[in-house]
Amino acid sequence: MKRNLITLLFAFTVIKMAGQTPNMSNPIETNDTSNKVSAIADNLTHKSISPLKKVPLDEALILIYDYDGILFTFDLESETIAWTVKATDSHTEMCANKVTLHDGVLYVPFINGEIFAIDNQTGAVFWKSRIGNSPDQIVLKDQIPVINEGKLYITSQNGNLYALNTKDGSLLWNYKLDSPNNDIPVLFFDNKVFTQSGTSFYSFEANTGKLVYQKTFEVPIHGKPVTDGENVFITNEKNELFALSPNKPDILWQFKFDENQQNVKERILCKDKKIYFASQGPEVSSLYAVDSKTGAQIWKTDFKDDTIEYITEESDNIWGYTRKAKLFQIDLANGEIATETKLTTQPISNFEFPVDDSLFYYSDAALIQFDLKTKDENEVYLRTSIKDDAYSAYVKIIR
């Protein structure tokens, strides 16, 4: 079922917006919710092309957000490219972001600040928004749009948290954060949005953008916030994990891992009242399991002379890969390594698990389907060009 290449025509209507800033001066922590408004220089523009609608899923497709910044879907049945979309400024070649699928619509951030809402079947664009107008700068980095009740939440490199209307991409509210560089996805939980920026951690009312609290730490916060359904957990850029209340700036407990390890970033997840995270160090990279109620360590698994680059959870196991192209499977219950395979291709994306005994990942040269039984690396789609400095891509099975 080969489809035609979609050619995108781009036009914007500039709308000047107001940014929200908290009414405080360098606080250590605050519950101030006055939320006064002040003007900011950054604009958000949007263009509605066609009415947003729910779209049936084309489950023969796998989405590939290539490391050159091009987004396309590959038909696994016909082995053809179904449709292709790319940012307006085509010379900004980098993926650096992830994609969210909601009601058959793909919400895609590009590094130049553009965000598209796309039909998963055809690649047709429902709307386009753009943060700022800086084609030569990275505006959106390491973001995945967070969708809830008609709102899309995302942070940018211009120092703002945005809430957009998923119907047309228009701005609902925005908030000026402490730091201009924000490259960690937000967390939606308990009708609140949580995000970090520099040394501050924030809690906002999701509907209004009203500040619930701002907590300032001594060391910059640089880990993805996660939740166990009761509290929120974050790591700093060094070797500390914190448990915080969602409603007030209280540290419930603090866990310190090995001093020579740090840089958790997005390698963290929660399941069944336990927190799992991977740290990186010069000689040893470790995967930890910590009790979310008490902060007590449950187990730790070390990878010597290697670095954990990626982790995810699937069927009560943690799957991931290392910098030296080692694929691993770890039992959540005890931290024991169930599978460890040296790959011939280096993964640079996330893992996707189809219904059969395999997994997909994108390497620096091809889309790979890895057979979990035979350990074969099958090239499903071979790239026509190679980029020496490729470091990130994203794949998603349409389902």
Image: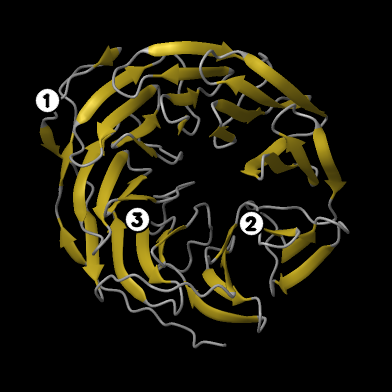
* Residue 113 in view (yes/no): yes
Residue toward you, 101 or 44: 101
Q: Amino acid at mark 3?
A: Ser
The residues bearing labels 3 and 1 have C-alpha atoms spaced at a distance of 32 Å
Circle on res. 112: none
Residue displayed at 65% across by 55% down: 390
- Give 383 or 81, whichever is nearer the viewer: 81
Residue 6 in the image, given as x and y percentages of width and height: 44, 82
Rendering coords of residue 297 (x, y %) = 65, 15
Please name the residue shown 54% across and 26% down the image: 273
Instruction: Provide residue 158's location: percent of width, then percent of height.
Output: 33, 43
Horizontal side of 337 relative to 143 (left or right) equals right
Please tell me which residue is depicted at 35% across the width and 46% down the height of the picture: 154
- In front: label 1 or label 2: 2
For mark 1, does the 10 Å Cα neighbourhood hold few (<14), some (14 to 19), or many (20 or more) residues?
Answer: few
Specify which label sits upstream in the sequence, 3 or 1. 1
The residue located at (51%, 75%) in the rendering is: 58
Q: CA distance from mark 1 to mark 2?
A: 43 Å
Residue wearing tag 1 = 34
Up/down of 191 relative to 136, above or below = above
The tag on residue 352 is 2
The number of discs equals 3
The answer for how far apart the CA atoms under marks 2 and 3 are is 33 Å
Closer mark to the observer between disc 3 and disc 1: 1
Q: Residues within 10 Å of mark 2 (few under 14, many from 20)?
A: some
x, y percent for residue 121:
46, 77
Q: Nearer the viewer, residue 269 or 379?
A: 269
Q: Which residue is mark 3?
A: 134
Which label's residue is closer to the chain start, 1 or 2?
A: 1
Label 1 secondary element: loop
Q: Are marks 2 and 3 in contact (CB under 8 Å)?
A: no
Circle 1/circle 2 CB separation < 8 Å: no
